[in-house]
Image (cartoon, rainbow, N blue to C red):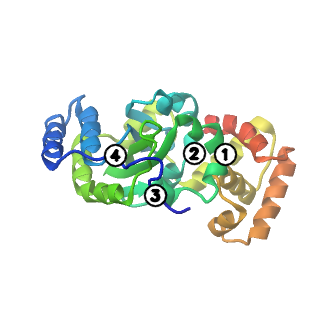
Amino acid sequence: MGCISPERGMDPVAGDAGDAGRRLGAVIAALDGPGFAPCLSDWFGACIGIDNLTVLVWAGNAPPRCLHRSAREESVHASVDEIYCAGGYLLDPFFVLDRSEAPAGVYRLCDVAPDQFRSSEYYTSYYRDTKIVDEMVYVLRPAFGVSIHVCLGRDVTSDTPFSDAAYETAMGLLPVVVALAARHWGHITVDAVVSESGQGAGSGMADITARFSDRLKTLCGVVLTRRQSETALLILRGHSSGSAARMLGVSPQTVKVFRKQLYARCAISSQAELFAMMMPILARLS
């Protein structure tokens, strides 16, 4: 999907360089303290213009732990614990990006989301209700095996997607954000995150697919092949047959066969039914 140019209003104007510098000074002064993330949010607001900020930590099989959340629109985080952290994150484009071992950087939703993301049940049943209209996420790796996602959001408060200029500004800030993350979150370890959640240490997409298939068999008595399980997850994430075919290295027609077999084994006939059936399974993976 192509990136969206601002259309619903003017791109929020960032503060002047002096204001941004003062706010960065406050961020540095707050390192290692509870005020770090709020100061970080203020700094991003001055430099880029954001409506909300969410900071998540990931490690192993553990579900995400929210280190910070702030938003003027209450819908943004209304279901983050109940749905997103309870298993919905497994369908999130930025989680999939992270597990593909993408390098540290800043990524736009329009660049990482599947081609039918806005038609997926994940979007219509959860993401749309957050009232987020656009996201840019810093994927950071401050310690071995640990990922930090600093999620910059625009929601209905401004009702304006991030412009290319805002993205360029975010890219220019990357070295500073990486250094700040290493200093503030570099002490976090995989063992600490995993032990807190009670999950194992595996983290790759193959491991997630295997656990998904195992839970489906145990809880629902439905046995899927690896390809059928992969197809189920790709459908839920918003991939069309063509996009899923590229991911799996097969033809679109083969993906349609996998989908037909999947629906038959699950005794369902729509993506909505697939989502309703699979969400409890995804929650058990968390």
In space, the residues marked 2 and 4 are separated at their CA atoms by: 31 Å
Residue 167 place in picture, x, y as percent: 35, 57
Determine the secondary structure under disc 1: helix
In space, the residues marked 3 and 2 are separated at their CA atoms by: 28 Å
In space, the residues marked 3 and 1 are separated at their CA atoms by: 37 Å
Q: Nearer the viewer, mark 2 or mark 1?
A: 2
In space, the residues marked 2 and 1 are separated at their CA atoms by: 10 Å
**First along the sequence among labels 3 and 1:** 3
Q: Nearer the viewer, mark 2 or mark 4?
A: 4
Q: Are marks 2 and 4 in contact (CB under 8 Å)?
A: no
Type of amino acid under label 2: Leu
Residue named by callout 4:
12
Q: Are marks 3 and 1 in contact (CB under 8 Å)?
A: no
Residue named by callout 1:
212
**First along the sequence among labels 1 and 4:** 4
**First along the sequence among labels 4 and 3:** 3
Residue drawn at point x = 71 percent, y = 71 percent = 250
Determine the secondary structure under disc 2: helix
Residue named by callout 3:
5
**First along the sequence among labels 2 and 1:** 2
Q: Are marks 2 and 1 in contact (CB under 8 Å)?
A: yes
**Quadrant assignment for the C terminus:** top right
Badge count: 4
